[in-house]
Image (tube, grey):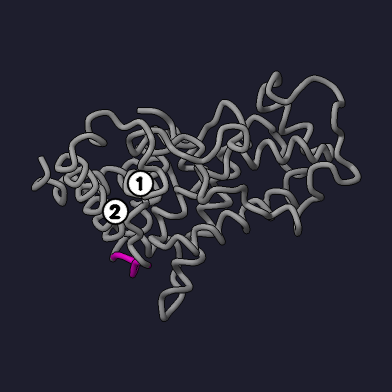
Amino acid sequence: MASDRTASQPESSRGYAPASGPESERGAGPRAGSVQCTSRAAPAIGAPGHQAGAGPALHDLDQATIVARAQNGDVSAFEWLLSAHEGGVFRLALRMLGDRAEAEDIVQETFIAARRSLPDLAAPQSFIPWLYRVATNKCFNLLRSRRRHPAHPDAFDDGSVPAGSHDAFAWGEADPRHQGDTCGGLCQDPALRYEAEAQMRALTGLLQAVPAGPRACWLLRDVHEFSYTEIATIVHLPESTVRGRIARARRILAEGMQSWR
């Protein structure tokens, strides 16, 4: 299964239309345009301070080097990171919250916070887990704000959190903007396409019934392919607890999707 958290090049150079299948949409963004957080977090490309043409092209550098350059104030390097990872952050937030507008807000807030705190990141190679930690915390904060009484994060291990709109496009396939994408036989067979879309809607709705703690751990492991150790760092929990939460989410999803087998 392709990872949902990495991108070999910035999305702005490839567009936002995902490839076929829920887990091949690597790096696809929330809408047909880049998240515009730079107006509050950093000057736009071409503005004073942008180091155009300085040094090797960004796509020739490894990501840790790009992060280090962004830490030193290279705006183009930060824009590259934004383009490369905003899609994965968006899908994590959408699947956590079930609401497209709220997910887009989380992306904005995550990258604004990342821009401000990036100079304090001690290890550039840990940028991706650190970024998802920021996004996951913001999702948890929003979920807690939905509840009448604020709860400790551990409370998300029991009892589901009220979902948002149960966005039917949470996994990408049903979004009519992408109907022209290559999708094998599903595009040619309306019955198969309808069945696949119905299955994805069922999975999306079922995922919102999984308690937020296990839901986050499952998404980070089975969709975004973080290691157990990385997830433990992201959600501030022992690795044994992370494994237990993932197992619980897998059990709930497997039982709920039995009718589709």
Query: What residue does disc 2 label?
Result: 204
**Labels 1 & 2 near each other (Cβ < 8 A):** yes
Residue 43 seen by the camera: yes
- Work out whether residue 229 or residue 83 is closer to the camera in this orientation and state it: 83
Who's the residue at 86% across and 46% down the image? Answer: 47
Three-letter code for the amino acid on which mark 1 is drawn: Trp
Residue 52 screen position, x and y as percent: 85, 32
Who's the residue at 68% across and 23% down the image? Answer: 59
Horizontal side of 5 relative to 204 (left or right) equals right
* Cα–Cα span, label 1 and label 2: 8 Å
Horizontal side of 143 relative to 195 (left or right) equals right
**Is 73 one of the magenta-colored residues?**
no
Query: What residue does disc 1 label?
Result: 171
**Is 162 one of the magenta-colored residues?**
yes
Q: In the image, which residues are magenta?
A: 160-164
Circle 1 SS class? loop
Who's the residue at 68% across and 27% down the image? Answer: 64
Label 1 or label 2, whichever comes before in sequence order = 1
